[in-house]
Image (tube, rainbow, N blue to C red):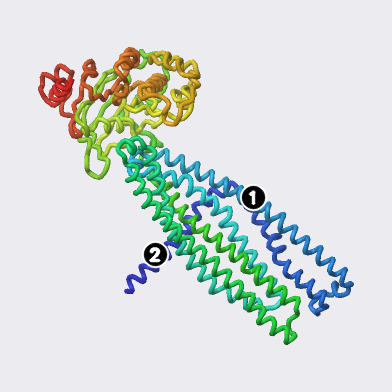
Amino acid sequence: MSIYQAVNKAYKRNRRRDNDWRLFLRLLPYARPYRRLLALSMLLLVPIALANAVQPFLIGLVISVIRQESNVYEFLSNLPIPQALTILQIALLITVSIRLLLTGFQGYLVQKVGQEITADIRQDLFNHVTSLAVRFFDRTPIGKLITRLTSDVEVLGDVFATGAIGIFSDLFSMLVIIGFMFSLQWQLAGLLVLMLIPISGLIIYFQKQYRQSNYKAREELSNLNSQLQENIIGIGVVQLFRREKFNAGLFRNTNKRYVKEVDTTIFYDSAVSATLEWVSLVAIAAVLWIGSNLLLQKTLTFGILSAFVLYAERLFQPLKQFAEKFTVIQSGFTAIERVTNLLDEPIEIRDNANPRFSIYDSQFGYIDEIVENLNSKNVNNRANLGEIKFEDVWFAYKDDDYVIKGLDFTIHPGEKVALVGPTGAGKTSIIRLLSRLYEPSKGRILIDGIDIREVPQNELRRYMAVILQDGFLFAGDVKSNISLGDGYTLQEIQQAAQKTNIAQFIAQLPQGYDTQLRERGTNLSSGEKQLLAFARAAIREPQILVLDEATANLDVGTEAFIQQALDELLQNRTAIIIAHRLSTIRNVNRIFVLNRGELIEQGSHEQLLQQGGLYATLHNLQMLGT
């Protein structure tokens, strides 16, 4: 090994050690609210450790009293043997009772704190994940996120509950035991302490190997969950294309890799336990061997030797527990690393803390006016709102592979604009940028003269409503899927249903507005789910309405049924409509024709047909197909 390699290896080792402590310190803020419970649990360690350490000493005294040895305290030696034994038995019973009662209570406190910390971390992690930009979810499998939110977070609670506090408890107990041993006989005590040094080094080595294997095992578990989630969501495609056996093979391979890594962690964990078991037996044998020689030389009493045999067993008992809890800590470090990596994931799209509008001062409070008008039921107050302007907007999902290139256009208040073009032209990307699910790579987007980056995301997304092709529904009742937790009254929900002509459909459901929907609304048809999506948009009275193939899942009869309601919903509102069926957008004010992220044509239906460009070509192709 070269000097450079040795130095680099040492640097990485020290950096990892520092990182471990830094990772552990990341958890301390979560422990602060429970510092009183933690302090109480730590305080209880003192009587527990003393009760544990004094028991072998008392048993040794019992043996010495029976044998009438010289190491018996004067006040005991002056008493009759039955009376002295009674006192020692009562003292032993007291120590056992203290240990049993306080150990159970202390364990309860620690577990309670661990669960509270786990809940706090899980909540913060959920809040953070739901605040991340859509770009993050494009590159991260959902199964891995679920693993971190559940399995990894659960391990973090053990870091405090049975890890950090448990290790401190075991170390304190060992120190008390060592103190008692040295007070009785320093040679035997020194022997047992010397045996701790090599065994500690061996434990540290096994724990490092365990840590590496545990990290790989958790990564494989994430892959396992990702495959499971993917197959469950895509079960229809899996079965239709007969991919059950093929996917089972992929899952089997991942499962084998996971089991292999878990087996490795079990090996190193078992190696620690077996080593400690063997060393504890050697320690007892060494105490008996050396102690018997000292006993023959009459420099040691039989009672002290008996006490040391028990101390040898009790000294390695907390060391075994220490090793087990150190394993929990190592697993915890792996979980902390994975969770903190997720918590450190930057939130790309944030609200501006100190908004500075790029418009003149007289309009500085314009956002308040927008929000006020948003809640207004008087559409005349909003007739001049809803202008959308793209100024030299460029956008790429990754690197410089631009899907939107230099878009410049203005959509006037109340105007209805359709976006058309071949697949990959950038239509959906425009909607994502307008909703601020992504940030433009270059340029800016303005609504009513205000850069959308200066508008709080919550208000921006209340100001517009987007109806997608697939209406996503949450598990819950019908009314909660319309209100989405925004606190609308039942009367307002019913009015929204009337406006979108779906009140009759809801009335036919088993419990009406209280009908429970399964996850993703699987007990409704695609058309029924889309109808609820229209009501969800209508209740919010948006100034800007975006329809992304919103009627694609509706049959001809249902589409005609809601067309009247849709026409009413579009009045005095700016609308952007994405549609592949060009026959549905003939009556819009303007049509934007996109190709490879560029706006190549715009105008009315008749104007674009006269131009004979891409729109005319697409229209003629659709006419041929009908």
Crowding at mark 2 (Cα within 10 Å: few <14, some 14-19, many 20+)? few
Disc number lying in front (1 or 2): 1
Farthest residue toward the bottom? 297
- At x 35% / y 21%, what residue is drawn? 543
> Could you tell me how many numbered marks the image carries?
2
Label 1 secondary element: helix
**Amino acid at dot 2:** Lys
Tell me the element at label 2: helix
Residue 448 appears in the rendering? no
Q: Quadrant of residue 619?
A: top left
Residue behind mark 1? 109
Check the picture and name the quadrant holding the N terminus: bottom left
Circle on res. 590: none
Which percent across, then down, holds residue 599? 18, 29
Q: Answer with the quarter of the image where residue 87 lies.
A: bottom right
Residue 387: image location, x then y, percent: 29, 23
Query: Mark 2 highlights which residue?
Result: 12
- Of callouts 1 and 2, which one flags the residue occurring earlier in the amino acid sequence? 2
The kind of residue tagged 1 is Leu
Left or right: residue 303 versus residue 312 is right
Q: Quadrant of the C terminus?
A: top left
Q: Residue 384: where, in percent of width, then height? A: 31, 17
Front-most of residues 23 and 273: 273
Q: Quadrant of residue 607?
A: top left
Q: Residue at x 76, y 69 (%)?
A: 58
The image shows residue 509 at horizontal and vertical percentages of: 46, 18
Query: Height in image: 136 above or below 22?
Result: above
